[in-house]
Image (spheres, grey):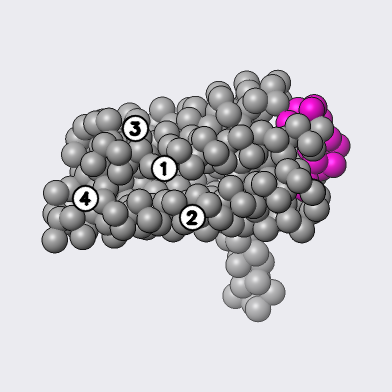
Amino acid sequence: MSTLSVSQVRLRARQYLVLTKPRVTQLAVFCAVIGMFLAAPGLPRLDTVIFATLGIWLLAAAAFAVNCLIEQQVDARMARTRHRATASGEITAAQTLATSGVLGGLGMFVLYHWVNPLTMWLTFATFVGYAIIYTVILKPRTPQNIVIGGLSGAMPPALGWAAVADAVPAQAWLLVLIIFIWTPPHFWALALYRSDDYANAGLPMLPVTHGDRFTRLHILLYSFALFGTTLLPYVIRMSGLLYLVSAVALGAVFVGYAWKLYREYSEALARKTFKFSILYLALLFGALLLDHWVLVF
């Protein structure tokens, strides 16, 4: 095999990897793993964690591949996404569907046979919610798309909890609620500095339909709602002081970003807010896990 053909194989492999939106998938799987560890009174079984993580990752990757296929015309009109192989036509619709089918099928097989059927069906419902309900129905029709469709993206902790406990109690749904409230300010910060892209693509994102100041106000309001929601694990005695201090500190920074963004907009600040929102969620759930281990051990 020539050097050129090796480069081509690597390029094509990377193009397929991009279809699965690996950075978004990593955050989703991370939240699912946190749910797995919180569901166990001690440490969960290692084989359950491994197979559940693999199955959830495979189905999430399949959903993102379908998303890229459905939005290939939209992606071609946006600077942020026009490099995707589906947008340029380098990967065909049939190839994308085959990739999604293989990934999704493997994911369902792994979850059903080596985790439990509840986790498989919940993860499959999340796949349908994101790939079909959000992408096909909500995203092109309403500026509240990310709010209504955010439930599918908020499901990973419940999926992880179900994998270990074979049940989804109120504590798991509280974690889902936190991500559900976090999603709009997180995504709208991105939409603010990408509003021209969304306008060119014909997508009714909130900054496009209602303007940037209206969007900034909603980011601020949701950041206050998020601050209050993240205190609930402590209120219901799901967590202790370590988590409470972390949630208050992280929430104060998040609200601070939102307040500055509302008072005086700049693209640089919107980018910082978006990037911090990702770090915020990872640190918040990490603090929840550390607090859980302190309480258990």
One can see residue 99 in this view: yes
Tell me the residue that label 2 is attached to: 250
> Is residue 21 placed above or below 74 in the rendered structure?
below
Say which of marks 4 and 2 sits in front.
Answer: 2
Decide: marks 1, 2 in contact (CB < 8 A)?
yes
Q: Quadrant of residue 204?
A: top right
Which sits earlier in the primary sequence, circle 3 or circle 1? 3
Residue sitting at 80 percent across and 53 percent down?
Answer: 266
Tell me the residue that label 3 is attached to: 173
Label 1 element class? loop
The x, y position of residue 148, in whole percent, is: 56, 25
The x, y position of residue 171, in whole percent, is: 28, 36
Decide: marks 4, 2 in contact (CB < 8 A)?
no
Cα separation between marks 4 and 2: 31 Å
Cα separation between marks 1 and 4: 28 Å
Q: Is residue 155 left or right of residue 66?
A: left
One can see residue 153 in this view: no
Three-letter code, disc 2: Leu
Q: Which mark is residue 230?
A: 1
Label 4 element class? helix
User: Bounds of the magenta span?
Assistant: 193-210
Which sits earlier in the primary sequence, circle 2 or circle 3? 3
Say which of marks 1 and 4 sits in front.
Answer: 1
Q: Is residue 17 left or right of residue 75?
A: left
Give 224 or 181, whichever is nearer the viewer: 224
Three-letter code, disc 4: Thr
Three-letter code, disc 3: Trp
Tell me the residue that label 4 is attached to: 48
Three-letter code, disc 1: Thr
| Crowd around label 2: few <14 · some 14–19 · many ≥20 (10 Å) | many
